[in-house]
Image (cartoon, rainbow, N blue to C red):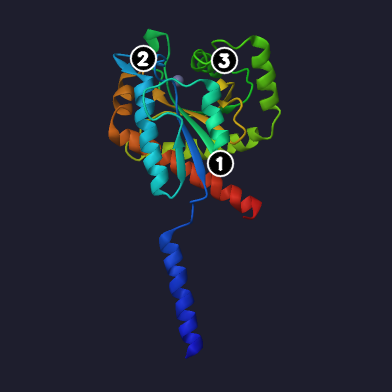
Amino acid sequence: MKSLKYLLSIFGLLILTACMGPDRSSRLVVVDAGHGGHDCGAQCEGKQEKDLVLQLVHKLRNEFRSEGYQVYMTRGSDRFLTLGQRTQIADKKDADVFISIHANAIADKSRFEIVEGIETYFLQKTRDEKSQRIAARENAAVLQGADELSRSVIIDAVLNGPKIVESNKLAIDVQKNIMARVKSRYSDVKNGGVRPAPFYVLVGASRPSILVEVGYITNSKERERLFTSDYQERIAEGIVKGVNRYLDNREKELGI
Ligand SMILES: [Zn+2]
């Protein structure tokens, strides 16, 4: 009888643990809204990238919190931060992952309604022209003041580090889960895939780090969706699911 009681109590405990879900309270994520303040980022039809990404990081913060994570935003209001300030926050907090949120744009007006989709980037040198072009646009604001030599020294140091493989894995999990979440309602969203690119905001981050381009604000259909709460919610849920997946796998690999 005693052993039956013991078995029942163990069983109850197992059910309780399963209901509560995994304990993620030791996981810390830093989410970075690109641009801010005088740097508006991409702009189209009166809509600005800096505003969109700020709305998105607030949703992301709530979503990560509801999953039990500790989460920190590099900016929670409309203010400008330098490149160094963004990644230093992730290092100071000793974050597990660093996620920078941006929106895309193209210059060629005749292609506004053709170019669309969601892309996730990780830091790596590339010869791909499209990745280089997008990186150049995103890098423009953070390059002020830094000379060419110091830029290349920093980048080489980071590119030779071991975080590229981990950042690539994180990017794959996040991109996959964002697409699944948005496509369950918006089946025509284009999957721009995972791409390597030399984004300066990812340089200096000594942890798995990615940059998500959530869509093109130069495309009217995508711009409209991006500024709705439902679409933003789906992107945030997809990112959190992707991070869950990546960190669960990493813990399994490390045997934690
Ligand atoms: Zn941007």
Ranked by sequence position, the earlier of labels 1 and 3 is: 1
Q: Nearer the viewer, residue 190 or 127?
A: 127
Residue 43 visible (yes or no)? yes
Percent position of residue 105, x then y: 42, 16
Ranked by sequence position, the earlier of labels 3 and 2 is: 2
Query: Which numbered disc covers residue 96?
Result: 1
Q: How many marks?
A: 3
Residue at horizontal 44 percent and vertical 58 percent from the top: 21
Percent position of residue 241, x then y: 45, 44
Given this view, does label 1 or label 3 mark the residue nearer the observer? 1
Residue type for callout 2: Gln
Residue at disc 3, secondary structure? helix
Q: Quadrant of ligand 1?
A: top left
Residue type for callout 3: Glu
Image quarter for residue 111?
A: top left
Query: Which numbered disc covers residue 129?
Result: 3
Image quarter for residue 106?
A: top left
Marks 2 and 1 close (CB-CB < 8 Å): no
Extreme residue toward the front, this view: 92
Percent position of residue 170, x then y: 55, 38
Residue bearing the label numbered 2: 43
With 127 as the anchor, is 42 left or right in this view?
left
How packed is label 1: few (under 14 Cα within 10 Å), some, or many (20 or more)? some
Residue type for callout 1: Asp
Residue at disc 1, secondary structure? loop
Residue 232 drawn above or below residue 34: below
Residue at horizontal 46 percent and vertical 45 percent from the top: 70
Q: Nearer the viewer, residue 85 or 244?
A: 85
